[in-house]
Amino acid sequence: MRKICFLLLLLCTIISCDNDDDVNNDATNQDQCNYQGFSYLDTNNNDQTLIAESELNTQHFPNASNGPYGAPGIEIASFTSSPTLFFTTNVIELNETGTGWISINGAELEAVTVTCQRAGTAVGDEIRLDVVYGVVEVEFCVVIDEVL
């Protein structure tokens, strides 16, 4: 089993992340980020924040010349939290789905599937990204700290 999957499963146990897209339209983050950070919905339908937004630094790269992997993108990092985290993706358009990369506690970067549910481009804009690795689904609901 890959190290990142083990770490995510250890952190989240058995989870799903319909805290922003559930079928009843009553999800916590349906219309806005009512809590922010790196989070998941636990088996009792309670939002659980793994890393608070205040511990995450979110950078938006609007130009291909300075974005992740040579394209516009987002990087989200926290090297002071426990666990530490580094995430990057070029999925930045509303409703776009594609690939991202995540590392937890310095593990090797692992490919994840990312869906952009709220897009932003300026400092202070919210961004909401669903991130899926195997059967584990988590969410970033963050505010852009820097545009580089």
Image (cartoon, grey):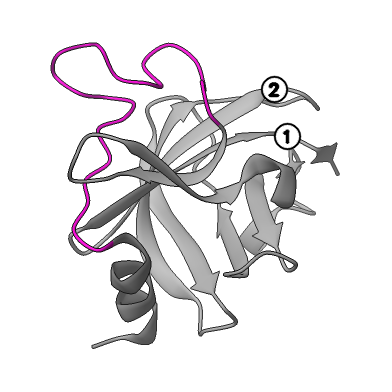
Give the magenta part as a residue range: 13-35
The foreground one among 58 and 39 is 39
Q: Report the side of 64 relative to 3 (left or right).
A: right
Q: Is residue 41 above or below residue 56?
A: above
- The quadrant in which the C terminus is found is top right
Q: Secondary structure at mark 1?
A: loop
Q: Return the residue found at the far left.
A: 23
- CB under 8 Å between discs 1 and 2: yes
Hey, what amino acid is under mark 1?
Ile
Residue positioned 25% across, 33% down in the render? 18
Kindly report the secondary structure that dominates the magenta region of the rendered protein.
loop
* Residue 144 badge: 1
Rendered image quadrant of residue 79: bottom right
Q: Give yes or no for residue 62 being in the magenta stretch.
A: no
Residue positioned 67% across, 64% down in the render? 81
Residue positioned 36% across, 45% down in the render? 40
Hey, what amino acid is under mark 2?
Asp
The foreground one among 124 and 47 is 47
Residue 64 visible in the snapshot: no
Q: Give yes or no for residue 17 being in the magenta stretch.
A: yes
Rendered image quadrant of residue 59: top right
The foreground one among 137 and 65 is 137
